[in-house]
């Protein structure tokens, strides 16, 4: 059995947590990540028959039965993940139709998965139906996107169009745009269900006055999605109070679509 601390998927997740903290997106215990693993990938490093403990999830997710996830722990600080991965992360397998998580590694101080586990697992189920290669769900609190939800109208088309207008390559990176949830109580099955519903049509879901969710095939892609949206929000927050003399119009957006071979989400451009 290989040493789990050398597993590329573990080291990459640790680096991602450190990087997200460095970006200021994950103050204190803010943010959480879940990474879907192949059973064979996990089996190289762990005896998958050895269950440390079982943890009820409080929801069902039959589509994810038997699947393995590496998940950040609740109350854990992203800045500390690199120093004690076994306490701050856990590897779980969902069983019993998703109602139970079997802990195979981690949460070594008696902890458990993020309080946003419902939003993560329900989003995985939805994104896997759209894209079988989806493996990552990521949540964090980037300052400019959060700020934007206080001053910009939360209509999804309008929010998406503003972000696309802020940097030329936004429409190329997230042609599916962003969906937006109004403020809701976090850490509940209700916000999980609402997030998953929004994940049917976009890989980015903004939680007004809270943060953002991203989904993607790997950690880099998902990080990059959030990074690009956050950069756009940063430009918006720099210019929102100034007269706008220039912008990226729909004509230019169509040129970008044609040049980069992407299709903007239906109904989002004229
Ligand atoms: P957890 O510490 O439970 O992951 O919660 C952090 C967070 O961002 C809640 O939305
Ligand atoms: Zn949060």
Image (spheres, grey):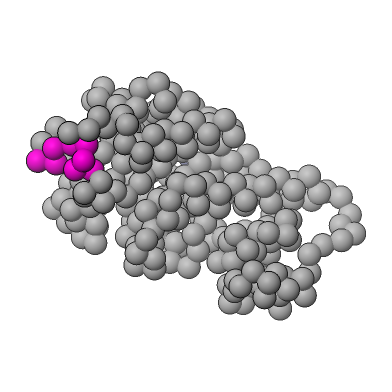
Query: Is residue 139 at all visible to an observer of this figure?
Result: yes
Residue 141 pos. (x, y %):
54, 40
Residue 165 pos. (x, y %):
73, 61
Please state if 51 lies on the left or on the right of 186 as rendered.
left
> Residue at position x 21%, y 40% from top?
44
Please state if 54 lies on the left or on the right of 262 as rendered.
left
Count of numbered tags: 0
Residue 241 pos. (x, y %):
83, 48
> Residue at position x 23%, y 43% from top?
42
Q: Residue furthest front?
A: 2
Q: Which range is magenta?
A: 42-49
| Main secondary structure found in the magenta portion | loop
Please state if 165 lies on the left or on the right of 113 as rendered.
right
Which of the pair 123/255 is nearer the observer? 255
Which of the pair 115/161 is nearer the observer? 161
The quarter holding residue 9 reads top left
The quarter holding residue 142 reads top right
Question: Compared with residue 29, is residue 212 higher up or lower down, i.e. above or below?
Answer: below
Residue 48 pos. (x, y %):
14, 41
Query: Is residue 29 at all visible to an observer of this figure?
Result: no
Please state if 170 lies on the left or on the right of 63 as rendered.
right
In the picture, the quarter occupied by the N terminus is top left
Which of the pair 184/98 is nearer the observer? 98
Residue 107 located within the stretch drawn in magenta:
no
> Residue at position x 56%, y 49% from top?
224
Residue 45 located within the stretch drawn in magenta:
yes
> Residue at position x 75%, y 48% from top?
235
């Amino acid at each position: 059995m290989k040493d789990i601390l050398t597993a590329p998927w573990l080291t990459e997740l640790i680096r991602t947590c450190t990087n997200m903290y460095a970006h200021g997106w994950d103050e204190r215990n803010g943010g959480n990540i879940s990474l879907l693993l192949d059973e064979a990938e996990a089996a190289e490093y762990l005896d998958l028959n050895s269950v440390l403990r079982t943890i009820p999830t409080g929801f069902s997710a039959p589509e994810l039965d038997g699947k393995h996830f590496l998940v950040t722990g609740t109350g854990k600080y992203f800045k500390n993940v690199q120093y004690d991965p076994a306490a701050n992360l856990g590897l779980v397998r969902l069983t019993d139709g998703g109602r139970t998580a079997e802990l195979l590694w981690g949460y070594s101080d008696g902890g458990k998965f993020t309080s946003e586990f419902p939003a993560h697992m329900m989003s995985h189920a939805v994104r896997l139906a759209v894209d079988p290669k989806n493996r990552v769900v990521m949540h964090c609190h980037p300052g400019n996107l959060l700020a934007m939800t206080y001053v910009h109208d939360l209509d999804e088309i309008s929010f998406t169009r503003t972000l696309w207008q802020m940097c030329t390559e936004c429409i190329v990176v997230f042609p599916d745009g962003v969906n937006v949830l109004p403020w809701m109580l976090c850490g509940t099955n209700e916000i999980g269900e609402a997030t998953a519903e929004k994940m049917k049509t976009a890989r980015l879901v903004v939680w007004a006055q809270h943060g953002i969710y991203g989904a993607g095939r790997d950690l880099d892609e998902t990080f990059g999605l959030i990074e690009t949206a956050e950069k756009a929000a940063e430009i918006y927050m720099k210019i929102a109070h100034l007269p706008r003399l220039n912008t990226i119009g729909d004509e230019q957006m169509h040129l970008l679509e044609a040049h980069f071979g992407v299709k903007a989400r239906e109904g989002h451009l004229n």
